[in-house]
Image (tube, grey):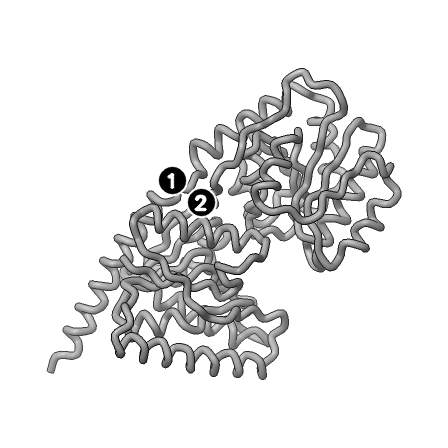
Amino acid sequence: MHIAFHTPLNPVGDRGVSGDRLMARQIVAALENLGHAVQPVAAPKTYFRAADPARFASVAADAARLRDALLAGYREGRPQPDLWFTYHNYYRSPDFLGPEMAAELGIPYVTAESSDSARRAVGEWAAQTATVRQGLAAGDVHFYFTDRDRQGLVPWENTGTALLALPPFVAPGPGPSRKTGRTGPPRLVTVAMMRKGVKLESYLTLAHVLERCRDEDWTLSIVGDGPCRTEIGAAFASLPESRITWRGQLDREATQAELARHDIFLWPGIGEAYGLVYLEAQAAGLPVVACDSGGVAETVRAGETALLVPERNEEALAAALTRLLRDTALRESMGAAARRFILAERTPARAAERLAEGLALALRNRSAKLKSSSGKARP
């Protein structure tokens, strides 16, 4: 099939570094490996940092003009897509294009990682949420990554709109490069962007946790950069400078190699939707220490590949880290289990199987809707 692939949050082809971009690229690759021709939709991002009714009206008008231009191009002979696939339709980045494009072309409409929020359906975000819900109502298949997202989508499930699990996945990088029996302190690593909000909160929590573990033996490598770099650096200033290495922002290949040289992945993950980086760390053979926040638990096997603690509980996070720092056999066995988990269950090949199932179901659902609509239109 020819698939139109729409990413309202961030253009799939840009050079940005973030979990949502990586997941979008992985989905495209999985679809292409199934034999489909995937064409990213050339549309500006629609991320709303604030509700802003004036900007909402402007974005909606721009989307309507783009929709009309795309449809005109198809009428003039440009190859039409056989299916529209939107990644990440949610209140801060609603899909203004997909539902109407699919309806006009009579093709299936599929989404991945859509989410709904009853709390956002009233008040300042009501217009954005209403746009999201147009897509949820129009969908033939919605792939969900976490059970929390599934719960929000349940009201939209019916005989013509299916919900299908697509567990977060990752293309594994190199295996562990650590040597069993290596001397020296355990090497911790974290990977995250340095920006305001929960990322900054997680970095501050990380600094507090390491302060609690000051008397333990460890070193830490930090991979990431961003507008809060100075503030984050100040939070770690009380810790011995020799124990922390600031690696800056690395590309994906370099990040994977960096992970493989370490022993424990430590990232609080406050407010994480799920955290693709936890999959990357486990693929490198690292045990994870994190908060049981958002969808984090659905990227790991708690107690087997990761130690999870209640969100914002710094004492519990420090205790979990200390446990792994002091028990070499435990962290090595958990690290080995982590890589086995990724290779067995969270690869692009496994995701492609689920995507193939969902696309076939979407075609059936759309066909049934078209037949039903045709029947109703008869006198």
Residue 235: image tag: none
> In front of the other: label 1 or label 2?
1
Position of residue 132 relative to residue 346, above or below, is below
Evaluate whether residue 301 shows in this view: no
Q: Which residue is mark 1?
A: 350
Is 96 on the left or on the right of 268, as rendered?
left
**Label 1 SS:** helix
Q: Secondary structure at mark 2?
A: loop
Residue 328: x %, y % from top left: 68, 20
Q: Amino acid at mark 2?
A: Pro
Q: Which residue does the image show at 49% across and 66% down from the upper left?
A: 8
For the residues bearing labels 1 and 2, Cβ distance under 8 angstroms: yes
Q: Residue at x 36, y 57 (%)?
A: 38
- Image coordinates for residue 151, horizontal then vertical, percent: 46, 55
Looking at the image, is mark 1 or mark 2 earlier in the sequence?
2
Residue 377 against residue 8 in the figure, above or below: below
- 361 vs 305, left or right, is left
Q: Would you say 256 lies left or right of 154 here? A: right
State the quadrant of the C terminus: bottom left
Query: Is residue 193 at least partly visible in the picture?
Result: yes
Question: What residue lies at 55% left-to-right and 48% top-to-bottom?
Answer: 274
**Residue 261 image offset from top left, x and y in percent:** 64, 30
In the picture provided, is 341 more to the left or to the right than 246? left
Q: Which residue carries the number 2 mark?
A: 167
CA gap between label 1 and label 2 equals: 9 Å
